């Protein structure tokens, strides 16, 4: 068994993820064309969808290229993934969903998702991760609600910080 065979996913998994990302990109582009044009001058709701679709397409092509390069690497059956990291990410996603359902708002839910994902990648949970996650989530919330006039779920924190803008 080579060192490459034990690191990373196999080529089939990479190709599957690449195909899924490309299909998702196409779906977003189709959905973006079905949205009405913006009523005011400026960036409308389709701009963000098109940008995300392009980024997903780039990631999909990158995964397909990685699958093409990795197709010659032998896969050893029985390899196990990092279950603890997967549990952290899934816990972050479930936490975000639950937090949004109880009306907690986007910023704190996305902060939790960031912290859980950072923990999955080995970052210890200290002040640094929640602070970075909070700043990023706040910037995303402000960009979508104030810059693009799209609504994200608002909780008490968002209403206190942004008032009637949410």
Image (cartoon, rainbow, N blue to C red):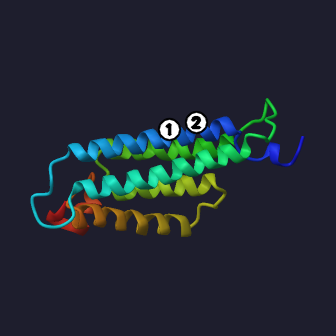
> Which residue lies at the image location 61% right of the left edge and 39% below the top edge?
15
Does residue 154 appear in the picture of this structure?
A: no
Q: Is residue 15 above or below residue 152?
A: above
Q: CA distance from mark 2 to mark 1?
A: 6 Å
Horizontal relation, residue 110 to residue 86: left or right: left
Numbered disc 2: secondary structure = helix
Residue 64, percent from left and from top:
60, 45
Q: Return the mark for residue 16.
A: 2
The quarter in which the N terminus is drawn is top right
Residue 57, percent from left and from top:
46, 50
Foreground residue among 138 and 32: 32
Circle 1 Cα neighbour tier, 10 Å, few/some/many (<14 / 14–19 / ≥20)? some
Circle 2 Cα neighbour tier, 10 Å, few/some/many (<14 / 14–19 / ≥20)? some
Mark 2 and 1 residues: CB-CB less than 8 Å, in contact? Answer: yes
Residue 141, percent from left and from top:
31, 62
Q: Is residue 54 above or below residue 73?
A: below
Q: Is residue 78 above or below residue 52?
A: above
Residue 59, percent from left and from top:
52, 52
How many badges with numbers are in the image? 2
Foreground residue among 65 and 87: 65
> Which residue lies at the image location 47% right of the left edge and 63% below the top edge?
133
Foreground residue among 107 and 69: 69
Can you tell which quarter of the image residue 11 is in? top right
**Circle 1 is placed at which residue position?**
20
Horizontal relation, residue 110 to residue 164: left or right: right
> Which residue lies at the image location 32% right of the left edge and 51% below the top edge?
104
Numbered disc 1: secondary structure = helix
The quarter in which the C terminus is drawn is bottom left
> Which residue lies at the image location 29% right of the left edge and 66% below the top edge?
142
């Amino acid at each position: 068994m080579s060192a490459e065979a034990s690191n990373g996913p196999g080529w089939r998994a990479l190709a599957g993820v690449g195909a899924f990302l490309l299909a998702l990109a196409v779906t977003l582009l189709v959905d973006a064309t079905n949205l009405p044009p913006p009523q005011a001058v400026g960036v409308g709701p389709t701009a963000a969808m098109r940008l995300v679709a392009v980024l997903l397409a780039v990631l999909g092509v990158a995964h397909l290229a990685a699958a093409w390069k990795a197709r010659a690497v032998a896969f050893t059956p029985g390899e196990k993934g990092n279950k603890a990291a997967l549990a952290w990410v899934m816990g972050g996603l479930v936490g975000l969903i639950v937090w949004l359902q109880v009306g907690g708002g986007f910023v704190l839910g996305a902060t939790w998702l960031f912290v859980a994902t950072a923990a999955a990648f080995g970052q210890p949970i200290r002040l640094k991760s929640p602070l970075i996650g909070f700043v990023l989530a706040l910037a995303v919330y402000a960009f979508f609600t104030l810059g693009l006039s799209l609504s994200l779920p608002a909780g008490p924190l968002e209403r206190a910080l942004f008032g009637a803008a949410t």
